Image (cartoon, rainbow, N blue to C red):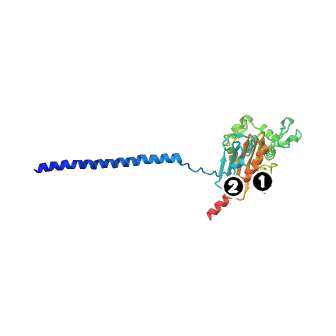
Amino acid sequence: MDASKNDGQLDFLSPLQAAQQARRRRKILAWLIFLTVIPALVFHLLATHYQPTKPVSPASPLLPLLRPAPDHWAIWLTDLDSSFHWQYQAQQPMPAASLIKLPVAVWLERQIQAGQISGQKLVTLRQADKQPGNGGLREAPAGRQYSLETLLRLSLQQSDNTAFHLLCNQLDRQKLDDDIHSLGLKNTSFSHDQTTAADIGYLWAKLMPEKFIGWLENTPFTDYSPAKLGDIKVAHKIGREEMMVADSGIIFLPHHRLVFVFIGRDLDPEEGIKVIQNLASASAQWVLELRTRNSELRK
């Protein structure tokens, strides 16, 4: 009798336990679906429909000034007195034109300072040395002598092509690319008339002798970057040839020394100069506004 009762209880409990186990399995399956399918669905919806807000370029004051051909420009900006830095296509190879005079002059000045050559060495101007383009030395009488120091100043301050030609005659032209690369300007080539905004910017920021900066504060090319800067002091070196124009240097703002490089190619140089004027003015204003904003945040 007792055994029969126990067997009946076992027969009754087995379906109950089976039902409970089935419910547990369904719950576990439901949780597995929730933990795997639902996140995947949410991720799919986000990836399909959510578009993150595109960050506004901090250079928005400058980029509109490059229209209608922004791809034709390369820009480098860095403030020597703050962490501000911005660049646009600064690694893009661009024509060097007269900007190439900067690294050649810096390298030669280093040779002079190292005692490898005398800055007072005299070079005689020949008729065959006279070059077209910028500078008044081509009007000087043949036979006149000039020191390397004078030729350096004229090649930078006046962008005198004849003075630069005489300087290069004193150097090994076959080695000039290697000499320029030794300065850290790996993307600048004398033989290929090529540079980048980054290389020229680095030169101004790290390599430029104070003497050169002083010379370049007084150039005749006031229609370039200084044109819209009023009484603000600018040391700068220009470059120009057919379908290309450039300016580079330092804008001396209150409490800031803003290194700039603007290089434009495949354009009308006269129109390019207007762009450079606007870029210089907008860059200076941008840095001053950032200073004001940062000062207000610190209050």
> Which callout, 1 or 2, points at the residue further toward the start of the chain?
1
Residue reaching furthest to the left:
1
User: Residue 66 location in percent, x, y?
Assistant: 71, 46
Q: Name the residue under label 2.
A: 286
Is the residue 64 above or below the residue 169 in the image? below
Image point 30% across, 49% down: which residue?
23
The one nearer the camera, 77 or 11, is 11
Quadrant of residue 138 in the image? top right
Measure the C-alpha gap from mark 1 to mark 2: 14 Å
Residue reaching furthest to the bottom:
299
Mark 1 crowd level (few <14, some 14–19, many ≥20, 10 Å Cα): some
User: Residue 77 location in percent, x, y?
Assistant: 68, 50
User: Residue 271 location in percent, x, y?
Assistant: 78, 45
**Callout 2: SS:** helix
The one nearer the camera, 213 or 277, is 277
Q: Name the residue under label 1.
A: 228
The one nearer the camera, 255 or 151, is 255
Q: Does the CB distance between marks 1 and 2 fall below 8 Å? A: no
Mark 2 crowd level (few <14, some 14–19, many ≥20, 10 Å Cα): some
One can see residue 87 in this view = yes
User: Residue 47 location in percent, x, y?
Assistant: 51, 46
**Callout 1: SS:** helix
Residue reaching furthest to the right:
141
Query: What kind of residue is marked 2?
Result: Trp
Query: What kind of residue is marked 1?
Result: Lys
Q: In this view, does 154 lie to the left or right of 34?
A: right
In the picture, the quarter occupied by the C terminus is: bottom right
Q: How many labels does the image show?
A: 2
